[in-house]
Amino acid sequence: MGAPAADDLLFDPAEALPRAELAVLQATRLRETVARAARVPFYREAFARAGVEPAAVRGLDDLERLPFTVKDDMRRHYPLGLLAVPREQVARIHGSSGTTGKPTFVAYTRRDLDTWAGLVARFLTAGGLRPGHLAHVAFGYGLFTGGFGLHAGLERAGVGVVPSGGGNTPRQLLLIRDLGADALICTPSYAFHLAEVARAEGFRPGSLPLRFGHFGGEPWTEELRLAIERDLGIQAFNNYGLSEVIGPGVSGECTARRGMHVQEDHFLVECLHPETLRPLPDGEVGELCFTSLTKEAMPVIRYRTRDLAALDRSPCPCGRTGVRMGRVVGRSDDMLIIRGVNVFPSQVEEALLRVEGTAPHYLIEVSRPGALDEVTVKVEVRPEEFSDEMRRLVALRDRIDREIHGITGVRMTVELVAPGSIERSAGKARRVLDHRRVPAL
Ligand code: DLL
């Protein structure tokens, strides 16, 4: 492997720690994390149920004995029941959507925010950004970790930031062009959409000043990468993360772009068989599971992401020693990612149940006709409503539309269909038809 290649600047020497040293650091941090988690009643009880005495956790070999954490545990302890520090030490709260319509919250101490910025700065640096560059952030700023997370990491890396936020694509193009941004930061589908809108506005997307793109927050394919690179004339890098674990910064690509280096001095990663939950050999696609090693406000123990990907431990020419995860090729639950927003079919169901006149039969169809995801929800109306006048049907549709948007945060096209027209099944009802192309395994 040798020294990192000249353009593979490390933001932090810890990225290239020899594996043996890394293992020692991880073991120390795992002990600290377990001790910290044991302050939370939920974890204390989970450890007790698993027969684990927190003080007896000595090293990495003990990981397998620790209990799993799932998203539902977070929901059940809404809003901040998994906090491991006094509320006064919380410096920021972010959140992600959940099935109940309520977000699940994640909290950060000052030190967590500092750690997080450093982790994001690492992958941005690994992907070519340098002090003096200017980055255009088109992620939403808010509870979603994308906007603020990338923003802080860019600043930490010494990169200038245009905090544009989401929406108003023509204006985004204007800012990128007139301010001379070197890098675009958003979801991959939005990057592609920007290029489309540029073309529709009559200019060549490749004429924009952009040279780099750092994209994440949703699954994408190698084909989409090539298309974005060709359209915008940039090098595009993939980065991955999830709010429960920290947000963006869990892993990211280096210039070799042979998978995303997991920041293993801050997170232990396991790749498990989604049903047996036994570890899988490298190269096999399984469910990724993360244990935080440095988080203070909300440590997570063996958090089951439901994201399916494979791990690769072969040496990387960049010199970073963190294991690489491949593209996320699917989910082991029914969560959909619509334009970067996590949506569960049960949220749509919840919205429908709030509206009188609908039958509990629906079908969510997802497609990507252009760059952006489109969702149509077909909803059966009750017979007495269906025969009713048009005006009432329109009002019903608008009501459903508002409820769905209120709960999921996503605009979906609502189509009212005749009673009995949605296929019934004897077993599990098929609620989702996802026509988007599944990334190749
Ligand atoms: O999406 C954090 C993030 C923001 C990552 C910006 C990267 C850039 P959540 O909203 O909690 O957090 O959604 C997390 O999004 O479990 C994956 O299913 C999916 N996801 C995130 N990044 C990628 C990626 C943010 N690069 C969920 N490839 C995760 C595939 C991704 N899926």
Image: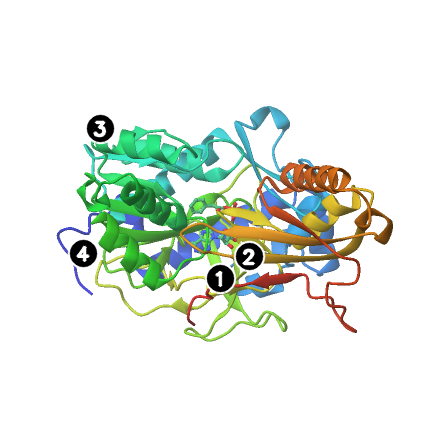
Residue at 28 percent across and 29 percent down: it is: 175
Q: CA distance from mark 2 to mark 3?
A: 35 Å
Q: How is the image coloured?
A: rainbow
- For residue 133, which quarter of the picture? top left
Between circles 1 and 4, the one closer to the viewer is: 1
Residue 138: horizontal and vertical position, in percent? Answer: 38, 36
| Mark 2 vs 4, N-terminal side | 4
Q: Residue furthest top?
A: 88
Amino acid on which the number 2 mark rests in the picture: Val
The reply to whether discs 2 and 3 touch (Cβ–Cβ < 8 Å) is: no
Amino acid on which the number 1 mark rests in the picture: Arg
Name the residue nearer the viewer: 55 or 29: 29
Q: Which mark is residue 178?
A: 3
Q: Which residue is mark 1?
A: 436
Name the residue nearer the viewer: 152 or 189: 189
Q: Crowding near pointer 4: few (<14 within 10 Å), some, many (20+)?
A: some
Image mark count: 4
The reply to whether discs 1 and 2 touch (Cβ–Cβ < 8 Å) is: yes
Question: In the rendered image of this protein, does residue 282 appear above or below residue 240?
Answer: below
